[in-house]
Image (cartoon, rainbow, N blue to C red):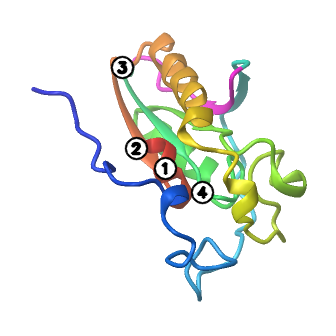
Amino acid sequence: GGRARCLCDRPSLLEIPALIIMTSACCPVGSLPYLAATHTATGRVVDLGAVELYANTTAASSTTGILICPDVWGWNGGRVRAIADGLSEQGYKVAVGKFLAPALDGGTDGDALPPDGDFSMDWIKQFPWETQRPKVEAALGFLKAEGCSKIGVLGFCYGGHPAC
């Protein structure tokens, strides 16, 4: 078995000329807005210094982990923690990264966009791979320290950038 290859060997979103990108929005026209988090989380917040995580590692004997890279609503927007907890119930150790801090206008729980926020290309440009890499590496290191020898990475919307 060889190492998995990233299929994102193309220019990042930040390198594509602005004329190709929608001028004021990240999500396609007609996309649903922010979804409030209504799930009662069963995990915990872990501060690794380089990044904060929402982690659910209750699957104590599991050696398989999943790192979730959330969308522009952040680590506590919509259903991301419910998804993490659901995957944990299925036997995975899961971490959700707080990757978009500093947040725009306070964000959602200190990360990403606020519930009533509008996407800002100027704001998102402060998160190139060079900024995200130490955060992703710290999150992967956390899962390894939790005993994971196999780790999958799942990115939602913007989260596909650091996931790749």
Q: Please state which of the two labelled residues, at mark 2 or mark 3, is closer to the viewer.
A: 2
For badge 2, the amino acid type reads: Cys
For badge 4, the amino acid type reads: Asp
At 68% from the left edge and 46% from the top edge, which residue is drawn? 75
Does the magenta segment cover residue 51?
A: yes
- Indicate the quadrant containing the N terminus: top left, top right, bottom left or bottom right: top left
**Closer to the camera in the image, 162 or 126:** 126
Quadrant in the rendering for residue 11: bottom left
Q: Name the residue under label 4.
A: 71
Viewer can see residue 37: no
For badge 3, the amino acid type reads: Thr
Viewer can see residue 125: yes
Q: Residues within 10 Å of mark 3 (few under 14, many from 20)?
A: some
Residues in magenta, as a range:
50-61
Horizontal placement of 44 versus 142: left or right? Answer: right
| Residue 56 point in image, percent of width and height | 58, 31
Distance CA(mark 4)–CA(mark 1):
10 Å
Label located before the other in sequence (2 or 4): 4
Q: Name the residue under label 2.
A: 164
- Local SS, label 2: loop
Q: Name the residue under label 1.
A: 161
